Image: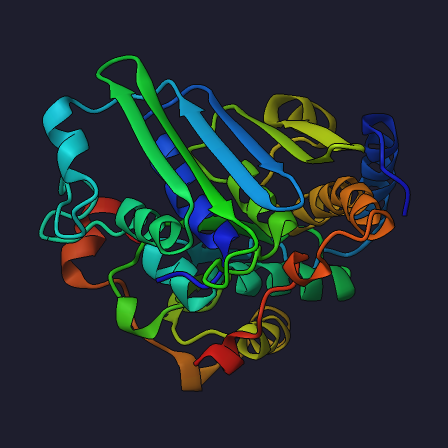
Amino acid sequence: MAKMTLEELRKLREKKQNEIQKRDIEGKDARIIVGMGTCGIAAGAKPVLDTFLEVLEEKKIDNVSVTQTGCMGLCYVEPTIEVIVPGMPDVIYGNVDVETARMIVEQHIIAKQLVTDHLFDRPAADIIKKDGGK
Amino acid sequence: MHICIDDYLLDIVQNSFEAGSSLVELTFAETGTKLSCEIRDNGKGMNAEIQRRVLDPFYSDGEKHKKRKVGLGLPFLNQACEACEGTFALQSEVGIGTTVSFSFNLNHIDTPPMGNVVSTFLVLLSHPLCKELVIERSLKTEKGGETYMLRKSELEAVLGPFETSGILSLLRQYLASQEEELEQYREKTHLDVHRRNTSPSRKQEM
């Protein structure tokens, strides 16, 4: 792969946009929020975010919102992520490693089933008022 | 403690975003033996008293998390730099901004691995509070080297907002292609490949 120019990037973007419009949208309005505080980083939140992008790219799902937030108050089960899919309860998953991240895309985002082994409720009470975990 | 150098970097650049900076400039310069890094922001800055206290892991301004008694980002970095004959410096002025500079001696046995620079830049560029971020990344030796610049506003003008998985994947592809030039130079000049962008498996560490 040669060093890409901004112009080449623009062309890739246009190509992708056309593809999105053609495809029936699978991950529409789904959101993944990765806890990227000091605790999250130390526990490996960065490779987890990478895996989400990688698996979504692999499954050709372009429209899932992937964002980051600070600590959600569950430092003991980092990396933590929040997943919001319309028609499903908003949940926080904990102890998410790269394998779990793959499972969350396949099972939660695509098959609409909770990954119950990694379910860790909502943000802790003292955090939720301040930033709502978002 | 963090595992890789890029984890320390990610952690402290976030401070600049959270300090309300409209511009953050990051220099990430590597030679064969040394990594020098500087983060300059125009955020709210810190007074002398706070500057004195931020290296204490048991100090936090409590603004983000009301009851929290620890603040580990800067203390972690300071400790890691000290452990491997690196340097650490903090300059700040209220209302003007803050500059953090640090370096790692890449030949020191206690220097952490570099980590994944591409992922770190991706996470920083797409941080929700990042307004403008300019990154200058270089690898230079006496014989020459490679450099690239990244500017958030420029990239966003091409891609649109960094929010969805498809756009982030494109951005990652772009960043990887920039970083690859550096890696090719590294291989060509037979620089220590031990420090390349390989992040140890988290499982091994735990």
Q: Residue at x 33, y 61 (%)?
A: A39
Residues B113 and B41: in front is B113
Q: Residue at x 46, y 46 (%)?
A: B10
Q: Is residue A32 above or below residue A130?
A: below
Residues A127 and B25: in front is B25
In the rendered image, the residue lying farthest to the top is B96
Q: Residue at x 46, y 68 (%)?
A: A88
Residue B8 is left or right of residue B199, and the answer is left
Residue B49 is left or right of residue B19, and the answer is left
Residue B18 visible to the viewer: no
In the rendered image, the residue lying farthest to the right is A2
Q: Is residue B5 above or below residue A102?
A: above
Residue A93 visible to the viewer: yes
Residues B44 and B199: in front is B199
Number of callouts: 0
Scheme by which the image is coloured: rainbow
Q: Can you give x and y, in whole percent of width and height, for residue B101 in the image?
A: 41, 32
Q: Can you give x and y, in whole percent of width and height, for residue B136 in the image?
A: 62, 28
Q: Can you give x and y, in whole percent of width and height, for residue B201 in the image?
A: 57, 74
Q: Residue at x 43, y 81 (%)?
A: B206
In the rendered image, the residue lying farthest to the bottom is A117
Q: Is residue B12 above or below residue A99?
A: above
Residue A89 is left or right of residue A26, and the answer is left
Query: Quadrant of residue B29 in the image?
Result: top right
Query: Quadrant of residue B185 in the image?
Result: top right
Q: Can you give x and y, in whole percent of width and height, for residue B163 in the image?
A: 58, 42
